[in-house]
Image: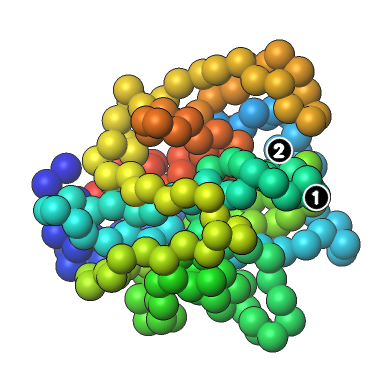
């Protein structure tokens, strides 16, 4: 795992790993899917698109990425109060989903990332419960100022070490009640004090599998 400590090596090697091994998409997502049968569902022409960002940066000798807790008071948001990656819905003026991810990252956590800092794109993920098709991107930031969260959208922010993401010990299953299912067992990542499940965990599972190739 020592390569995770060198951001220059990571930024060079990560795109190479995607080229060498490819993206696994559903093969990765199913490992963290709350309801695996729903993976066969497909977006429609009415499905909304979104872009999210895995922003890798170095802090105290470790490579990390931030996750946010969305505000809990938004009753119209089926993902209200959940842990997610910075990002949000596509707007026409964005032109591309990459621009969406970068714009939303700046709005939510106050970090201005440029397109040339993006080193890869992961598999798109369709989320039936909110009818969103999410495109995840991976970027690096060598010099990162403090985060400045938007209190209207973000309740909390915390960072995860890349080395912790690939550890088997972080993977757990818990029983949940949600708006669409009751008392069912769900896989996720345990990053104290938070437990990450659903779409974010599915995206991070594919990211983790790529990290293991480095």
Q: Nearer the viewer, mark 2 or mark 1?
A: 1
Residue that badge 1 annotates: 76
Name the mark on residue 39.
2
In the rendered view, how is the structure colored?
rainbow
Q: Is residue 22 left or right of residue 124?
A: left
Q: Which sits in the foreground, 120 or 173?
A: 173
Q: Residue visible at 66% across and 84% down?
A: 95
Q: Nearer the viewer, residue 184 or 205?
A: 184
181 w.r.t. 51: above or below: above
Mark 1 residue element: loop
Q: Residue 9 in the image: state x and y as whole percent.
A: 17, 63
Is residue 196 something that shows in the picture? yes
How many numbered marks have been drawn onto this rendered protein structure?
2
In the image, residue 168 lies at what x, y percent? 33, 25
Regarding mark 2 in the picture, which secondary structure is present there?
helix
Q: Quadrant of the N terminus?
A: top left
């Amino acid at each position: 795992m020592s390569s995770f400590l060198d951001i220059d090596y990571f930024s060079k090697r990560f795109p190479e790993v995607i080229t060498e091994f490819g993206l696994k998409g559903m093969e990765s997502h199913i490992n963290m899917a709350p309801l695996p049968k729903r993976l066969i569902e497909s977006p429609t022409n009415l499905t909304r698109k979104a872009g999210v960002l895995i922003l890798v940066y170095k802090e105290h000798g470790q490579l990390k990425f931030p996750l946010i807790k969305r505000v809990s008071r938004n009753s119209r948001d089926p993902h209200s109060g959940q842990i997610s990656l910075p990002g949000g819905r596509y707007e026409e003026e964005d032109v591309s989903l990459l621009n969406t991810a970068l714009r939303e990252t700046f709005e939510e956590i106050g970090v201005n990332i440029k397109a040339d800092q993006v080193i890869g794109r992961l598999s798109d993920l369709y989320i039936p419960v909110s009818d969103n098709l999410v495109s995840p991107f991976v970027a690096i930031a060598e010099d990162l100022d403090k985060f400045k969260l938007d209190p209207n959208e973000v309740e909390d922010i915390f960072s995860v070490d890349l080395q912790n993401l690939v550890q088997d010990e972080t993977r757990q299953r818990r029983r949940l009640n949600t708006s669409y299912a009751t008392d069912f067992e769900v896989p996720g990542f345990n990053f104290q004090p938070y437990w990450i499940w659903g779409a974010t965990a599915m995206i991070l599972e594919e990211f983790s599998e790529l990290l293991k190739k480095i």
